[in-house]
Image: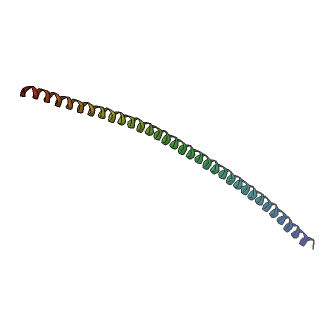
Amino acid sequence: RVGGGGGMKKKIAALEELTGHLVLQTRALESRAETGDQAAREVQELLQAMIREMGERLMAKVLESKEEQDHRQELQVAENKRMQQHVSALKSENAQLIRRVTALEELVGALQAELGGDDDA
């Protein structure tokens, strides 16, 4: 029986050693899992920051494009008004020229009639 008890002690010692080894492996695995979880959280935070930054950049580009488009539209409206004023001025000048030409034609007709009348006399 004493010899059998020694075998049992060895088995218990071996089991305790195995248990200790398994506890160490479990702790190492838990540590690796925690490290993996931490890395996953860091990656997630990094991705969220990148997405947020890209969104901000996109919004800035959209705003910049809108401002440029608004500015171009304002310039076009101003140019259209200027051209409209120029066309109106040309129409007015044309009407004045037509009146002058008509007056000159009437004067020429009157002079021709007067000169023609002198030749007949």
Asked if residue 102 lies left or right of residue 66, the reply is left
Q: Residue furthest bottom?
A: 1
For the N terminus, the quadrant is bottom right
What residue is rendered at 31% in x and 32% in y? 93
Nearest the viewer among 74 and 120 is 120
Report the residue at 47% width, 39% height from top. 74
* On screen, residue 16 above or below 84: below
Q: Is residue 100 above or below residue 20?
A: above
In the rendered structure, the answer to whether residue 81 lies left or right of residue 108 reads right
Q: Residue farthest to the left?
A: 120
Q: Judge left or right: residue 88 versus residue 34.
A: left
Task: Give the number of marks.
Answer: 0
Name the residue rendered at 61%, 50% in the picture: 51
**Front position in the image: 75 or 82:** 82
Quarter of the image with the C terminus in it: top left
Q: In front here: 67 or 61?
A: 67
Q: In this picture, is 77 found above or below 3?
A: above
Out of 63 and 26, give the one closest to the viewer: 63
Left or right of 28: which side holds 16? right
In this view, which residue lies farthest toward the front?
121
Residue 37 x/y as whole percent: 71, 55
Looking at the image, which residue is at 55% across and 43% down? Answer: 63
- The x, y position of residue 38, in whole percent, is 71, 52
- Image coords of residue 85 (percent x, y): 39, 35
Residue 2 figure quarter: bottom right
Instruction: Classify residue 101 by image quadrant.
Output: top left
